[in-house]
Image (cartoon, helix red, strand yellow):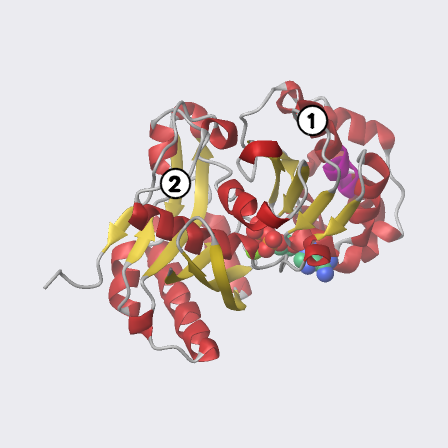
Amino acid sequence: MRWAIGLMSGTSMDGVDAALLNTDGERVAEIGPFLTLPYEPAVREDLRAVLGGVGDVAGVSERVTRLHAAAVGQLLRQADMPAWRIDVVGFHGHTILHRPAQRRTWQIGDGGLLSQLVGIDVVDDFRSADVAAGGQGAPLVPVYHRARAMALEPPLAVLNVGGVANVTWIGRQDALLAFDTGPGNALIDDWMRAHTGRALDEDGRAAAGGRVHGEVVAALLRHPFFDQPPPKSLDRNDFDASLAAGLSVADGAATLAEFTARAVALGQRFLPEPPSRWLACGGGRRNPVLMAALARLLLAPVAAVEAVGWQGDALEAEAFAFLAVRRLRGLPQSLPGTTGVPWPTLGGRLHRARAAA
Ligand SMILES: Nc1ncnc2c1ncn2[C@@H]1O[C@H](COP(=O)(O)OP(=O)(O)O)[C@@H](O)[C@H]1O
Ligand SMILES: [Mg+2]
């Protein structure tokens, strides 16, 4: 077993998540503290400005790397652990471009610099190898979901509602199928930002006072993505909320939340066997309007992952700690059932904090 730190900067651009894990990349022995280092509004603007791979990518990449180093320092203090006890940091970075069909995916963040700043070996660039082999490069968390779900009764579905939403279906005999279902919070966040200046619809308050415009939901659902069988993945900006233009703030928030839930529900037809339950993680599980829509539309009960003792904000960061250890051990991180890659694939680039003695 090794101690590993996982770092995630999600497409929501809300901050750096950092988690500490004791694992061999197959099982999880212990879960340490977790923290989120929220991004200042200026950092969010920096990130937004380089989405697509334009502008001062190198400058933003360095700034973001330094914030990740700060998150590592803070986590170590919280855990009361010295850096030398940590075997590896799994550094996802921030996705600024995701175009698997063109075999391109781009996460900014400099693993070499991070390893020097924190004095710990770092694994970064988790997605390129998968995409180069013909996979979607996403989602990568499913093997971690499966490891955590070992104690639970299959089949079940884990739904992560981040900026983009993705599902992991776990069947009997370790069967795994995963794909992006559609937008997660990104459209709601963009809507709120454009119309109120706030970063999110906190606790779904705007949506709760709004009315769903069915014709807008229907138009959004006409996107060919929803008929495409998995594997499939999305870029944060593959959908845009302009179809909701003209609605009131509340109606727009309600309509986009409904669309997000309907997109998840449409994903059900691709699951090999109906799950007996849905477990929701990611920030979207805090939006009660979204959760109520999911409860209404899904064919099995849905609850936040806290119902089974998991921490819904920490799972993705924990997953990148787990995946970094798999990289050290040479265990695949993506599978035909998770990213559509033709064979089990090992990704990630290792940056040594110092040369071997
Ligand atoms: N209290 C809340 N009410 C509604 N939405 C929330 C709340 N807390 C978080 N969120 C949503 O979750 C998002 C962050 O989720 P997260 O899982 O961190 O996504 P990502 O992995 O893309 O960063 C926020 O942008 C917001 O849309
Ligand atoms: Mg986040």
Tell whether label 1 touches label 2 (CB within 8 Å): no
Q: Name the residue under label 1.
A: 273
Q: How far apart are marks 2 and 1 (CA)?
A: 33 Å
**In-image side of 183 versus 132 (left or right):** right
Magenta residues, dominant SS class: helix
**The C terminus - image quarter:** bottom left
Look at 58% across and 46% down and name the residue there.
150
Residue 260 part of the magenta segment: yes
In the picture, the disc for residue 106 is 2
Q: Residue at the location (36% across, 52% down)?
A: 325
Sequence-first disc among 2 and 1: 2
Decide: few, some or many residues near mark 2? Use Cα within 10 Å; few <14, some 14-19, many ≥20. Answer: some
In the image, the segment drawn in magenta is 256-262
Residue 80 appears left or right of 151: left
Residue found 32% across the figure and 71% down from its top: 85
Mark 2 element type? strand
Would you place residue 137 above or below residue 36 in this image?
above
Query: Residue 34 versus residue 11: which sits nearer the camera?
Result: 34
Horizontal and vertical percent for residue 18? 48, 63
Which quadrant, please, contains the N terminus? bottom left
Please provide percent x and percent y for residue 212. 87, 39
Residue reaching furthest to the left? 357
Any mark on residue 50, and which?
none
Q: Where is residue 71 in the image (x, y as percent from the top left)?
A: 44, 69
User: Regarding mark 1 in the picture, which secondary structure is present there?
Assistant: loop
When the figure is inspected, residue 248 is found, relative to residue 176, above or below; the finding is: below
